[in-house]
Image (cartoon, rainbow, N blue to C red):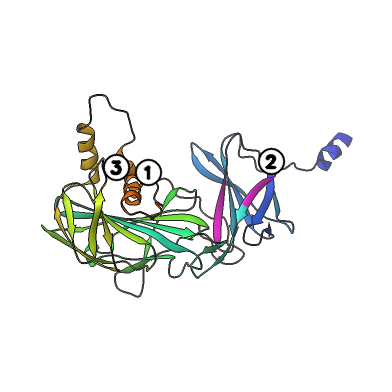
């Protein structure tokens, strides 16, 4: 009997504990929601959600096991992830969050690259947009979207949107129609650091094809790219040079109106294969250029246009979306 009472008196020990730090204020954050996820072969499993105490502390009794785990902190309508690898300490863990606002503040588009690939009577268009947020407040606008972009009517509203948060994975988001015809928004928070958006769509193309679009952001640098065998002509469009390994042409665009005549056909994957065939007998084994096209082209832009900072990194293969949010945020609906 005494032994049973002794067992009841033993407190439950925390498997994972730590604190949530608000990097906007520099102080521990009271009332933030923290969820622990188990990552395994079966997928992502939500184990436990708690609120931080007055000192910003949290603790979990649910055990995710020895494998990798994910902590997700939610504050002010935005979620922030913290990965725990098997060798990562699980006590005294810090999860960073930031305050958010519905206006861009210091968040601005730094670079916008548009890749045109005319193939088999279709024009494949890939747009890569880099947002930089050097401040300490996240930009979050669920109603109108943090990114707004123009989609040609020939695309019939069909576009694939992938978003990558700072040090995060690419996840898919839906494009939201706005009150302005052919203008769509993307509900994805712009956290402090670099956020990337990738848009992919196709439209019918004659020969030569004519593409008409609009760049909605006033800030940042816009570059147009075509694979080998494809050229652009249009007002405000000037060729800067070619990327050496794939011979992709890089163009600058002045102004926000985009109307170009596209001659030829080809894709970056074709150019990558051709560049590999033309190499010497003994070659160093490198990653496929097509998988790293934006990094390679971004490097070429930095060489050709002195003074511009290359912000592009190679986009990885699309991955699974971030885990679903656990419960509503203290200050509004939460976004990953």
Q: Residues within 10 Å of mark 2 (few under 14, many from 20)?
A: some
| Residue lying at the far top of the rendered structure | 282
Residue identified by numbered label 3? 290
Q: Which residue is mark 2?
A: 15
- 247 w.r.t. 255: above or below: above
Query: Percent from the top left, x then y, of residue 301?
Result: 32, 51
Residue found 74% across the figure and 56% down from its top: 55
Mark 1 or mark 2: name the one nearer the start of the chain: 2
- 97 lies left or right of 187: right
Magenta span covers which residues?
76-95
Q: Which residue is mark 1?
A: 317
Look at the numbered discs 1 and 2 and tell me whether their residues touch, using CB distance below 8 Å. no
Mark carried by residue 223: none
- Between the residue at mark 2 and the residue at mark 3, the CA separation in whole angstroms equals 44 Å
Residue 83's place in the image compared with 51, above or below, is above
The residue sitting at the bottom extreme is: 179
Which is in the foreground here, disc 2 or disc 3? Answer: 3
Q: Answer with the quarter of the image where residue 123 lies.
A: bottom left
- Label 1 neighbour load within 10 Å: few <14, some 14-19, many 20+: few
Please state the total of marks drawn on the protein image.
3
Does the magenta run of residues contain 239?
Answer: no
Q: Crowding at label 3, few (<14), some or many (≥20) Cα neighbours within 10 Å?
A: some
x and y, in percent, of residue 200 in the image: 30, 55
Evaluate whether residue 60 shows in this view: no
Left or right of residue 249: residue 287 = right
Q: Residue at x 49, y 38 (%)?
A: 42
132 or 309: nearer the viewer: 309
For the residues labelled 2 and 3, say whether their Cβ atoms are less than 8 Å apart.
Answer: no
For the residues marked 1 and 3, what is the alpha-carbon distance in whole angstroms? 11 Å
């Amino acid at each position: 009997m005494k032994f049973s009472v002794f067992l009841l008196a033993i407190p439950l020990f925390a498997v994972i504990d730590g604190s949530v730090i608000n990097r906007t204020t520099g102080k521990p954050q009271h009332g933030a929601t923290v969820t622990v996820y188990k990552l395994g072969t079966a997928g992502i499993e939500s184990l436990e959600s708690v609120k931080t105490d007055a000192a910003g502390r949290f603790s979990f009794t649910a055990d995710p096991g020895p494998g990798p785990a994910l902590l997700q902190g939610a504050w002010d309508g935005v979620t922030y992830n913290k990965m725990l690898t098997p060798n990562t300490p699980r006590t005294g863990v810090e999860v960073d969050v930031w305050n958010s606002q519905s206006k861009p503040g210091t968040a601005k588009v730094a670079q916008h690259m548009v890749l045109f690939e005319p193939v088999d009577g279709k024009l494949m268009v890939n747009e890569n947009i880099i947002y930089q947020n050097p401040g300490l407040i996240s930009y979050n606008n669920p109603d109108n979207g943090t990114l707004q972009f123009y989609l040609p009517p020939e695309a019939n509203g069909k576009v694939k949107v992938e978003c990558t948060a700072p040090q995060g994975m690419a996840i898919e988001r839906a494009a939201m129609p706005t009150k302005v015809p052919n203008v769509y928004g993307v509900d994805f928070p712009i956290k402090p650091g670099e956020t990337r958006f990738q848009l992919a769509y196709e439209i019918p193309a004659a020969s030569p094809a004519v593409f008409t679009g609009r760049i909605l952001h006033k800030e940042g640098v816009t570059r147009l790219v075509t694979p080998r065998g494809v050229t652009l002509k249009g007002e405000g469009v000037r060729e800067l040079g070619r990327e050496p390994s794939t011979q992709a042409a890089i163009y600058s665009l002045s102004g926000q109106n985009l109307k170009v005549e596209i001659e030829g056909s080809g894709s970056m994957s074709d150019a990558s294969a051709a560049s590999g065939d033309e190499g010497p007998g003994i070659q160093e084994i490198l990653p496929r250029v097509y998988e790293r096209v934006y990094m390679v082209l971004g490097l070429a832009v930095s060489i050709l246009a002195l003074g511009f900072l290359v912000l592009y990194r190679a986009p990885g293969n699309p991955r699974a979306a971030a885990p679903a949010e656990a419960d509503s945020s203290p200050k509004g609906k939460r976004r990953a």
